[in-house]
């Protein structure tokens, strides 16, 4: 999703099985990926799938591409 540094950001919080989360973070780390980047990509897919193109265009107008979070 496109975003500007001036855009308002929201936090999404979910509950997930702790053991599965630990395994997920481990294997993402082996690929030098982060859970945050994977979730952002998944949210963008959900956004594109469910929000009409005209609305997406309005929201994304004049916005540079969102930069992924660096993995540590």
Image: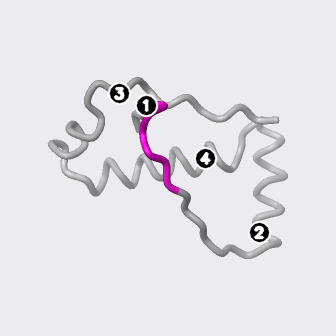
- Mark 1–mark 4 distance (CA, rounded to whole Å): 19 Å
- Mark 4–mark 3 distance (CA, rounded to whole Å): 21 Å
Mark 3 Cα-neighbour bin, 10 Å: few <14, some 14–19, many ≥20: some
Write down the residue under mark 1: 4
Using the image, tell me which numbered label, if any, was put on residue 63. Answer: 3
Q: Circles 3 and 1: CB distance less than 8 Å? A: yes
- Mark 2–mark 4 distance (CA, rounded to whole Å): 15 Å
Could you say which quadrant of the image residue 59 lies in? top left
Using the image, tell me which numbered label, if any, was put on residue 61. Answer: none
Q: Circles 3 and 2: CB distance less than 8 Å? A: no
Mark 1 Cα-neighbour bin, 10 Å: few <14, some 14–19, many ≥20: some
x%, y% of residue 15? 65, 75
Using the image, tell me which numbered label, if any, was put on residue 20. Answer: 2
Sequence order check, earlier mark of 1 and 4:
1
Magenta segment? 4-10
Sequence order check, earlier mark of 3 and 2:
2
x%, y% of residue 49? 31, 53
Secondary structure under badge 2? helix
Write down the residue under mark 4: 38
- Mark 2–mark 1 distance (CA, rounded to whole Å): 33 Å
Q: Circles 2 and 1: CB distance less than 8 Å? A: no
Q: Horizontally, is 52 left or right of 49 in the view?
A: left
What secondary structure predominates along the stretch shown in magenta?
loop
Identify the residue at horizontal 42%, vertical 39% (top origin): 7
Was residue 19 drawn as part of the magenta stretch in this picture? Answer: no
Q: Compared to 53, does 15 lie above or below?
A: below
Foreground tag (1 vs 4):
1
Q: Circles 2 and 4: CB distance less than 8 Å? A: no
Foreground tag (4 vs 3):
3
């Amino acid at each position: 999703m496109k975003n500007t540094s001036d855009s308002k950001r929201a936090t999404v919080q979910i509950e997930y099985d702790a053991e599965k989360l630990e395994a997920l973070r481990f294997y993402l780390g082996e690929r030098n990926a982060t859970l945050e980047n994977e979730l952002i990509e998944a949210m963008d897919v959900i956004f594109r799938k469910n929000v009409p193109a005209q609305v997406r265009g309005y929201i994304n107008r004049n916005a540079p591409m969102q930069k992924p979070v660096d993995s540590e």
